[in-house]
């Protein structure tokens, strides 16, 4: 059965392992826990496109059959650097991902050393805590071209028919200096545009709006650098014709800003 595609706002750092943040992240936690129940069947594998893996002049795909951990956050409690997410990799899926992308003209290389970054293991540990579904990570490209990443998603769309769950992980608001009251109104303004674009627009209008995302209200305030928005483009490409619904929406994310996650298909 055909899998949906998700864009998840993955939250800040290793939040599931910081008990003081439980209340602040309750809505995000609930949305991730509910993810398996929204699927038509258990995924055969997961393809994770994380904002925290950025390559230049090519895409990179993880090929390690037993990926390690990559603790790409700083200043958190010591125990958060001992978190383990022991899901296996899938060299076979990695090869298929590379083939699909290269067939459409994308340059792709393999990385046998890459470990799970927190854009991947944080949402996965909440949604699929058993860590028994193979996971492959795929990078985004440093130029952050929206059309490139929409086409990237389109190249991968056939994986959905094979039982592969595609999850794009970023944040719908990501300005490290404005996770506070300064970010409250800009995040709401951008979110209103994003909700309309994702859930009320035709597929072609949705894609075009995302190509022109910098024209959205408060766009460059909410995304000074668009690394955390670009995974959304991949998700939209992979489910180009499918309707989207917001499966997470919080107007007090990280205490003060609005953030959202979407399910397509």
Image: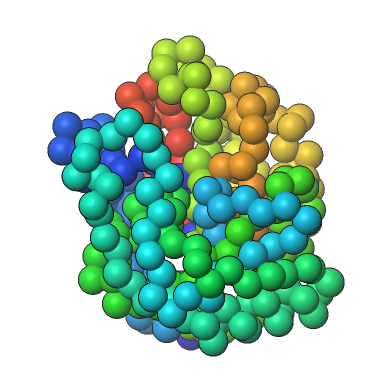
**Residue 36's image quarter?**
bottom left
The correct choice, above or below, for 43 with respect to 81 in the image is below
Position of residue 66 in the picture relative to residue 198 (left or right):
left
**Residue lying at the far right of the rendered structure:** 105
Determine the image quadrant of residue 134: bottom left
Q: Is residue 154 above or below residue 148?
A: below
Q: Residue at x 73, y 74 (%)?
A: 101
| On screen, residue 219 above or below 73 | above
Outermost residue, left side: 19
Query: Looking at the rendering, in which quadrant would you find the C terminus?
Result: bottom right
Say whether residue 242 is visible.
no
Q: Quadrant of residue 235?
A: bottom right
Residue 8 in the image, given as x and y percentages of width and height: 46, 51
Instruction: Tell me which residue sits at (44%, 62%) in the image.
Output: 115
Q: Position of residue 201 (x, y in %)?
A: 68, 49
Residue 124 lies, in percent from the top left, at 35, 61
Query: Foreground residue, 205 or 207?
Result: 207
Q: Residue furthest front?
A: 113
Q: How many marks?
A: 0
Question: Is residue 222 visible from the viewing direction of this image?
Answer: yes
| 238 sits left or right of 69 in the view | right
Q: Residue at x 53, y 26 (%)?
A: 175
Query: In the drawing, does residue 107 fall left or right of residue 45?
Result: right
Which residue is depicted at the point 29% across and 77% down? 132
């Amino acid at each position: 059965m055909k899998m949906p595609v998700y864009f998840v706002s993955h939250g800040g750092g290793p939040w599931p392992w910081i008990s003081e943040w439980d209340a602040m992240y309750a809505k995000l936690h609930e949305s991730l826990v509910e993810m398996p129940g929204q699927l038509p069947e258990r995924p055969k594998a997961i393809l994770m496109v994380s904002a925290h893996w950025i390559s230049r002049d090519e895409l990179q795909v993880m090929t390690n059959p037993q990926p390690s951990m990559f603790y790409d956050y700083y200043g958190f409690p010591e125990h958060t650097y001992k978190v383990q997410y022991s899901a296996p990799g899938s060299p076979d899926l990695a090869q298929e991902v590379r083939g699909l992308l290269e067939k459409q003209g994308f340059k792709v290389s393999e990385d046998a050393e890459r470990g799970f970054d927190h854009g991947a293991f944080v949402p996965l540990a909440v949604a699929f805590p058993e860590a028994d579904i193979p996971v492959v990570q795929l990078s985004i490209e440093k130029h952050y071209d929206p059309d490139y990443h929409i086409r990237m998603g389109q190249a991968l769309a056939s994986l959905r028919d094979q039982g592969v769950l595609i999850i794009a992980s970023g944040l719908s608001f990501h300005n490290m200096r404005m996770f506070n009251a300064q970010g409250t109104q800009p995040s709401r303004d951008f979110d209103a545009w994003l909700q309309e674009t994702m859930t009320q627009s035709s597929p072609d209008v949705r894609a075009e709006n995302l190509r022109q995302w910098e024209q959205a209200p408060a766009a460059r305030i909410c995304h000074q650098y668009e690394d955390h928005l670009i995974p959304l483009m991949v998700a939209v490409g992979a489910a180009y014709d499918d309707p989207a619904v917001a499966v997470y929406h919080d107007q007090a994310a990280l205490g003060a800003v609005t953030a959202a996650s979407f399910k397509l298909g």
